[in-house]
Image: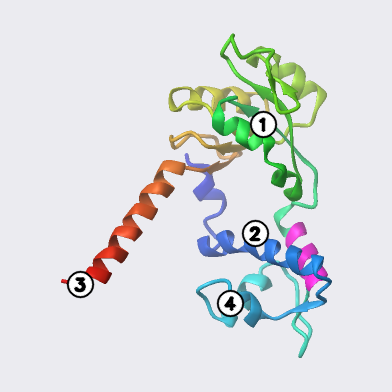
Amino acid sequence: MYAENKLFKNLPEQYLKRIPFYHQILSELALKNEAYVSSRYLAGFFNVDETQIRKDISLTGYKGKPKYGYSVQGLKEAIEAYLGINYHNTAVLFGAGKLGTALIEYEGLADYGLEIIAVFDNNPVKIGSPVGHFNILSPSALPRVIRSFDIGIAILTVPKTAAQEVCDQVTAMGIKAIWNFAPLQLSVGMDVILRNENLAAGAALLSYYLKKSNHRQEGP
C-alpha cells in the first residue's frame, strides 16, 4: 500500500505544492515588516487566479480582513499550525553520501521545525567519521537513538537496493514518517506517512517540458 496517496487523497495536489511557498512568501514579507497581503499579490507568484488563492487559504481555516487582505503574521502562523512546522520534529538520516551530506548541512530544514538527530550508514569505512556536526553511526545504534529521542521521521538517502530494507527496519521500530530520496516507490503500512522525492523523475519532467517548449518555438 502506498500510504502517500492514501493519506492525502482528499486534498488537492496542487494545493499541497503551493502552501509551503505561501509560507516562504509570508516569511519574506514579515522580514520587511509588511502587515497585510492580498490574494492578488499571492496569485502573482502562481499560475492561478485570486479565487484559487482564497480557496487554498480557506483550507487552513484562516480568514482575511475586508479591504485589508490577510494579516501576514496571522496567516503565516496559521500555515505553520496547519503544516505542523511550528512543532519540533526530530529525524534520523540513513545514507551519508553526497545527497545525505547536503541535507545534513542544509540549514533551511530548521525553518520548518525539522532537526536531524543522528546519521547512519552501513559502510564500515564511514562509521565513526564526521559529517557536518555528527559522527556517522552504525545502524545497530538505531534502537539506542530511538530510546533516547522521540524520533518522528526517517530520511532515506540510501541506494535503491537498500531502501525498502531500511524502510522496513525503521517502521518496525515505530517511526511513522518516511522521507524517501531513493529512486524506488516504497511499500509501507497504512499507518506510515510516506513522501517520495524522485530527483531523476524531476529531471526527466524538466527535459520533457523543455523539449515541448522548443518544438513550439521551432514550429512545424
| Image quarter in which the C terminus is found | bottom left
Dots 2, 1 in contact, CB < 8 A: no
Secondary element type, mark 4: loop
* Circle 2 SS class: helix
Q: Position of residue 209 (x, y in %)?
A: 34, 60
Query: Alpha-carbon distance for marks 2 and 4?
Result: 16 Å
Q: Residues within 10 Å of mark 3 (few under 14, many from 20)?
A: few
Label 2 sits on what residue type? Pro
**Mark 3 lies on residue:** 219
| Residue 158 locus on image (x, y percent) | 52, 26
Which label sits in the foreground, 2 or 4?
4
Specify the amino acid type for callout 3: Gly
Whole-angstrom CA distance, mark 3 to mark 4, is 30 Å
Of residues 86 and 194, the one drawn nearer to the viewer in this rendering: 86
Disc 3 secondary structure class: loop
Mark 1 lies on a secondary structure that is loop
- Is any atom of residue 98 visible in this view? yes
Q: Are marks 3 and 4 in contact (CB under 8 Å)?
A: no
Q: CA distance from mark 2 to mark 1?
A: 24 Å
Kindly identify which residue carries mark 1: 175
Determine which residue is flagged by label 2.
20
Q: From this view, report whether residue 124 is shown above or below residue 168.
A: above
Q: Percent x, y for residue 11?
A: 56, 61
Label located before the other in sequence (1 or 4):
4
N-terminal label among 2 and 1? 2
Residue drawn at x 64%, y 59% is 20
- Report how far apart the C-alphas of labels 2 and 3 lie in the structure: 37 Å
